[in-house]
Image (tube, grey):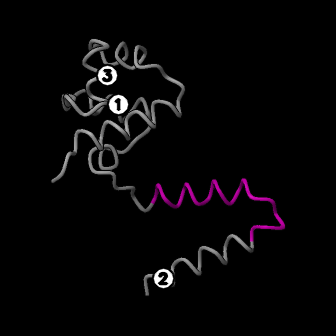
Amino acid sequence: MGDYKKDMGLRLKDQRRKYNFTQEQMAEKLEISLNHYSEAERGIKGLSVENLIKVSDILDLSLDFLLKGRKSDALMLTEIAEVLKACPNDKKLYLLEIIKLGSKLYE
């Protein structure tokens, strides 16, 4: 099963930073000590089920991704759509071709 706490802590830290929250803010939102939250991000301690659900809501993460690092197909499609939207119109066809070529790697 590996070191799931450490892996989860890294995902937690990355997403917290994307939302520009400090560890202090997250600890406050979860009503836990800063030390406990910091240890969760470092993989030393885990979070209760209740706090995992809160984290999922606060940081817009699926529990599956938070706990196991797996992204749902729907989430990946959303991320692909966001990349496509940000791409200049004259480059979108190139990006689509890259995606198609990438999918052929697994045939």
Q: Quadrant of residue 93?
A: bottom right
Depicted 86 relative to depicted 17: above or below: below
Separation of marks 2 and 3 at Cα, in angstroms:
40 Å
Which percent across, then down, holds residue 50?
22, 28
Q: Is residue 66 left or right of residue 78?
A: left
Determine which of the numbered discs, if any, sits on residue 106 in the image.
none
The reply to whether the C-beta atoms of the residues labelled 2 and 3 are less than 8 Å apart is no
Residue at the right extreme of this rendering: 90
The region drawn magenta spans 74-92
Depicted 17 relative to depicted 98: above or below: above
Label 2 crowd (10 A; few <14 / some 14-19 / many >=20): few
Badge nearest the viewer, 2 or 1: 2
Q: Residue at x 54, y 25 (%)?
A: 20
Report helix, strand or loop for mark 2: loop
Which percent across, then down, holds residue 66?
32, 43
The reply to whether the C-beta atoms of the residues labelled 2 and 1 are less than 8 Å apart is no
Task: Check disc 1 and report the residue beneath it.
Answer: 55
Task: Check disc 3 and report the residue beneath it.
Answer: 38
Which of pointers 3 and 1 lies earlier in the amino acid sequence?
3
Q: Residue at x 39, y 55 (%)?
A: 71
Label 3 crowd (10 A; few <14 / some 14-19 / many >=20): some
Q: Amino acid at mark 2?
A: Leu
Separation of marks 2 and 1 at Cα, in angstroms:
35 Å
Q: Is residue 93 left or right of residue 100?
A: right
Report helix, strand or loop for mark 1: helix
Quadrant of the frame with the N terminus: bottom left
Q: Amino acid at mark 3?
A: Ser
Which of pointers 2 and 1 lies earlier in the amino acid sequence?
1
Separation of marks 3 and 1 at Cα, in angstroms:
14 Å
Depicted 26 relative to depicted 104: above or below: above
Quadrant of the frame with the C terminus: bottom left
